[in-house]
Image (cartoon, coloured by chain):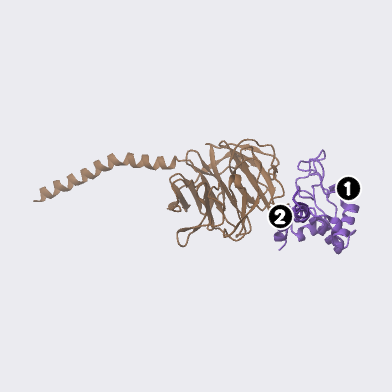
Chain colours: A brown, B purple
Amino acid sequence: MRSIVHSTTRAAWGFCVLTAAILMPALVQAQSADDAQPVKALTTNSSGALLVLRNSGLFVIEGGTTTKVGLPATDQEAQPSSLARGADGSVYLAGPGLGVWRYDSAGDSWQSLNDTLPGLGVTAMAAHATQPETLYAYLGKDGMFRSRDSGAEWVKVDSGPREPVQAFLHSDMPGSMESGWLFAGTIRGVSRSMDCFCFWGDAGDLRGTVSAIGYDPTAPENVYAVIEGQLHHSADGGETWTSLKTPQPVTALAFSPSQGLVVGTANGNLLAGGAADKWTPVHE
Amino acid sequence: MNRWFYPLVLLAVPVLASASGRPEDADSAPTEVIQGRQIYEQYCAACHGRQGEGAANWKKPDDKGEMPPPPHDETGHTWRHSDAMLYRMIAEGWRHPFNKSDRLTMPAFEKRMTAQEIQSVIDYLKTLWTDEQREYQKTESQ
């Protein structure tokens, strides 16, 4: 009897080991495939955690732990593409076919802010750096819209730069006639305006299609823009630009309170730092 | 010709003109607007143009690396600023932060104009805007 039990146990263990040996490479491959998806957008939340948007969904990375966040239940045609952090730490998600949504972390739910937008074709959005209720959305030919009441009412304020806007940023860099500056990444480079929408002018002579833009909130003259995977830095509010070396093409960027500049890459990696071209992986 | 045609035209033209959203005629304006225009012509027109048309190529830095004086009419962005901001810029002056020089390209007028005179200039500038722009600026001023 004991020998029968012993051989059954050995057979069971053998089966488990064999199954694991077969499945493990597939599981590892699946994880790699997920990581290999380009990072579409990055931001931080009120606790400083990184939020990473990939084709496979939205992920929160905090303390080395990654948690998946469900996306708003919308039309299958919706393309989540922009993340923004409000001045109060609120997280916003936007994209063509999606409009603008705010994440409620307490209820783990999304609130649509689209009631008064003329459509859902939001190709870029930004949140005011210091005014929690002020948001900006760019809807292509419909122009630029601003809400001063957290998305309840949107008002068209401008047509925007001459070229279509791909990425949008509000900065509290000093020197504005109003409360800050707007940077728009277009298909021609970076365009800049005071947030009175006085007029859009070229921010330096950086040329190309800008896919991501960000700034250092602790030193607002430092602006970063990505053109075709190449990261560029301006230390004077967009007047002049220099290229930064990165190990992989960059697709998204954000500033983390604890890690500083964080970039997302075409290979799906997250890299922090960048001082003296040294980058360290952000552990997920 | 229909005998009603000319009276209808006479009635319709002023209505259409006032509904066009065009800038107002300052000549038939209140006293403060007329005063504002006189002060504007004395202090502001030399740089911003007699009709508020601004400098040519005002959107690009000039040879000195300074942003030229912008228009104050409907083609500019003056209408995007609140009364308080316009008052501050006239009183304290302004320098575009990306100018290559450090001087105030828009001089401070608080020692040359009274508060009432500055306000009358702002009232005059509003006559150079469209109805939509005046409405936008009114909201910004609230």
Q: Mark 1 — residue?
A: B46
The circle drawn on residue A271 is none
Q: Are marks 1 and 2 on the same chain?
A: yes
- Residue at mark 1 to residue at mark 2: CA–CA distance: 27 Å
Residue A102, image x, y percentages: 52, 57
Secondary structure of the residue carrying numbered label 1: helix
Picture layout, residue B125 above or below residue A11: below
Q: Mark 2 — residue?
A: B132
Residue B86 appears in which quarter of the rendering? Answer: bottom right
Residue A135, image x, y percentages: 60, 55
* Discs 1, 2 touching: Cβ within 8 Å: no
Q: Is residue A216 visible?
A: no
Q: How many marks?
A: 2
Picture layout, residue A77 above or below residue B114: above
Residue A204 appears in which quarter of the rendering? Answer: top right
Query: Mark 1 or mark 2, which has the lower sequence index?
Result: 1
Secondary structure of the residue carrying numbered label 2: helix
Q: Which residue appears at 47% of the width and 38% of the height?
A: A267
Residue A263, image x, y percentages: 54, 44
Q: Which residue appears at 85% of the width and 52% of the height?
A: B107
Out of A278 and A255, give the one closest to the viewer.
Answer: A255
In the image, taking residue B24 as reference, residue A219 lies left or right, namely left
Residue B39, image x, y percentages: 89, 56
* Residue type indicated by callout 1: Ala
Q: Residue furthest left?
A: A1
Question: Which dot, 1 or 2, sits closer to the camera?
Answer: 2
The chain holding disc 1 is B
Q: Which residue appears at 62% of the width and 36% of the height?
A: A243
